Amino acid sequence: MNPLLLLAGGAAVLLVGAVFTLMVPPRVVRAVALSLAFFLLTYGGNNTAPSEVWQACFIGSIALLTLALLRSRAPAAGGRQFVLISVWWGWVGMGVLLTGSLPLTTMTLYFGLAVLAAYVASSLDPAELRILYAAIVLTAIFQMLLGLAEVLVDADPVWGYRGGTRDNPFLDGYDRTQGTLGHPIPFAVLQGIAFIVAWSNPAQWKQRWRLAALACLAVGLVIGGTRSVMLSLVGALLVHLASNGKLTSWVRTLYVLLASGVVLVNVDVGIVRIAEELVVSGSWSHRLGAFESVPNLLARPPLEAWFGSGFGSVDILYDRGYMQQTYLRVVDDMFVYALGTMGIAGLILLVVVSIVAFIFAGRTTRALLVLMIGMFFSFDVFAWMYTGILFSVFVTLPAAAPRVEGLKVPEKSLVAHSA
C-alpha cells in the first residue's frame, strides 16, 4: 500500500473529526458518526481489503464514534441487549486470549469497534434513527451503482476477487457483483438490509423516494446473485408483516400471506426456483457438510468440545479432520462455526443472544435480525468483520417511534416510547 495514500487517508479522517467538532450539532452527532462509520466500514472494513486499509477504517470509525460520545448530550445508553452483546464479545475475546487464535491487533480493533458501535446505536433517539436509516439506504444504493459498473462495463471490484469470480444464478452470463464489500454475500446482505429499511419505512419517507429506493435495491439484490439472501429476505419481510399488532392489520397480513403462498405455488415468481437451485447446487452440498461435521466437533476432548479452539481457528479444525467440507475450507454456517471455534458454550450463548435480541427488538429491527440470523445457516457472519459489526448494531438498535398524524409529540415522549 502506498504510504502517501495512507497518509492522505489519515488526514481525511482527521479532517472529518475536525468538522465533527466544529459543525455537527451535538443533538445528532451520534447518528452522523455512526452513519459515517457505516459508510467507512462498507468501503474498506472487510476481510478482503489490505490490512492497512481495513485497520485504518476501523481506527477512523472508533475515533469518530468516540468523538461523537464526547460531544453528544446522550440519554442513557446500554440496556439489556447491549449487556448481552458485550458478554458475547467478551466471551469470544477471552477465548482468543487463551488460545492465541487471532492476532491481538485484529481482536482489539474488531471486537472493540463492535462493542462501541453497539453502545452508540443503543443511545439513538427517533430523530437520529432516521438519519442512520437514510445512511444505510444511500450507502447500499452507492454500492449498487458500483456493482452495476461491474456488470455493464466489466469493471473489477475495488479489492479484487476473493477466490475468483462467481456465476450469477439470476443473470446468465454475468458474474456476481461485490462492490467494495470484498465478496458477493456481504454485498447482497447490505442490499437486503437496506431493502427492509426502505420497505418498513421507519423514517416515513415520501412514497416516490421509497419506491425509487426499493427499485434500486432490487437491482442490487439481483446483481449480487446470492440466493440465501433472497430467501432470508422473504422470511424477514413476512416477519415484518406479521409483527403488526392491530387486529385489522393481522387479518390483512394473514390474507397477504395466504395470497402470497398461492402465488408461489401456482405461478412461481422465482422464490421456488431459487430454493430448488440452492438445494441442487454445490453451495448446498458444501453447507450440508458443515452439519455433517457436528458429530466430530461434539466428540472432541471435553474441554475443547465445551470451549472450542478459539475464534478464527477454522484452519486448525480442518487440519485435524473435524470438518467434513471438501468444497472449500470455509465453514459457511455461523452455528457450526461457533460450535467449532467456541464450543458448546459459545453456541449456546449465540443462540441466547439471537433469541433475546429478536424478542425485544422493534418491528423494523426484528426484520433486520431475521435476515441476519437467516444468514447464520449459510454464512459465517461473525468471521466477516463487517457483518459481525452490523449484527452487533442491530441487536441494540432502539425501536423507531411511530408516526403521529396531525399531532406534535414532545421529543421526550418519543424517546420513552422507543425504549
Image (spheres, rainbow, N blue to C red):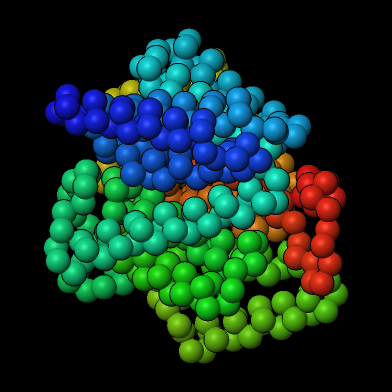
Q: Residue at x 40, y 76 (%)?
A: 273
Would you say 91 lies left or right of 297 here?
A: right
Decide which of 164, 123 is in the foreground and name it.
123
Residue at image coords 17%, 24%: 3
Residue found 83% across the figure and 58% down from its top: 409
Residue 121 seen in this snapshot: no
**In what quadrant of the picture does the N terminus appear?**
top left
- Give residue 259's position: percent from left, percent from top: 63, 85
Residue at 27 percent across and 60 percent down: it is 147
Q: Residue furthest front?
A: 22
Residue 264 x/y as whole percent: 52, 82
* Residue 376 vs residue 240, the one in the foreground: 240
Name the quadrant containing residue 71.
top right
Considering every residue shown, the one lying at the far bottom of the view is 266
Residue toward you, 377 or 106: 106
Quarter holding the C terminus? Answer: top right
**In this orientation, does residue 41 appear?**
yes
When the figure is inspected, residue 278 is found, relative to residue 253, above or below; the finding is above
Apparent side of residue 215 relative to residue 349 in the rendered image (left or right) = left
Q: Work out whether 418 lies above or below 192.
A: above
Residue 130 image position (x, y, % from top left): 61, 55
- Which sits in the foreground, 409 or 168? 409
Left or right of 182, for residue 22: right
Q: Residue 249 at what x, y percent from top left?
A: 78, 76
Quarter where residue 293 is shown: top left
Rendered image quadrant of residue 270: bottom left
**How many callouts does the rendering have?**
0
